[in-house]
Image (cartoon, rainbow, N blue to C red):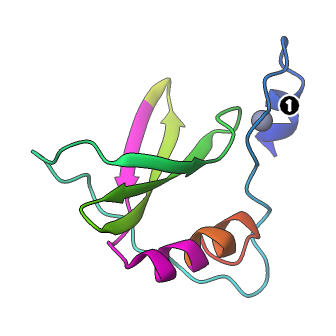
Amino acid sequence: MSWVVGHWRFPPHCTAPHVSAVQSHCDQLIWNAPRRGEPDGRVMQWTCDCTEAYYELIALGGLRFIRRTVLRNGKSVIHESDRWSFRVADALWSALLMGQAR
Ligand SMILES: [Zn+2]
């Protein structure tokens, strides 16, 4: 787990939660390429960026989605989940943090 390495990076800056390891029951989220020409959403919650993949819960136009940023070969690769109502999005965000969705 690379976050263990990142966790000891100096100075430590882990103030946001980390996602848990994937559990045996894990919903597979659909990850889409970012849509072009959209206004920036509001970042409601986020996970620590010391890991190779971090997540943000974004509110945009009454809906919410999760943005995933993966560092690959020094580049940020961004994907977005489907758009959900805030209830569904908050439930899936919690599941993501607990390793029950990824
Ligand atoms: Zn961290």
Q: Residue at x 70, y 78 (%)?
A: 100
> Can you say whether 96 is above or below 25 in the image?
above
**Horizontally, is 83 left or right of 27 in the view?**
left
Q: Residue at x 64, y 35 (%)?
A: 49
**Residue nearest the viewer, comparing 35 with 21:** 35
Say whether residue 99 is magenta: no
Residue kind at label 1, given as amino acid type: His
In magenta, the rendered stretch is 76-91
Image coordinates of residue 54 in percent, x first then y, are 59, 45
Quarter containing the C terminus: bottom right
Say whether residue 83 is magenta: yes
Whether ligand 1 has any atom under 8 Å from the Cβ at mark 1 is answered as yes
**Horizontally, is 57 left or right of 34 in the view?**
right
**Horizontally, is 58 left or right of 102 in the view?**
left
Image coordinates of residue 53 in percent, x first then y, are 59, 45
> Can you say whether 62 is above or below 13 in the image?
below
Q: Residue at x 9, y 45 (%)?
A: 37
Image coordinates of residue 74 in percent, x first then y, are 50, 23
Q: Residue at x 44, y 75 (%)?
A: 86
Residue for badge 1: 7
Farthest residue toward the left?
Answer: 37
Residue 31 quadrant = bottom left
Image coordinates of residue 12 in percent, x first then y, are 85, 20
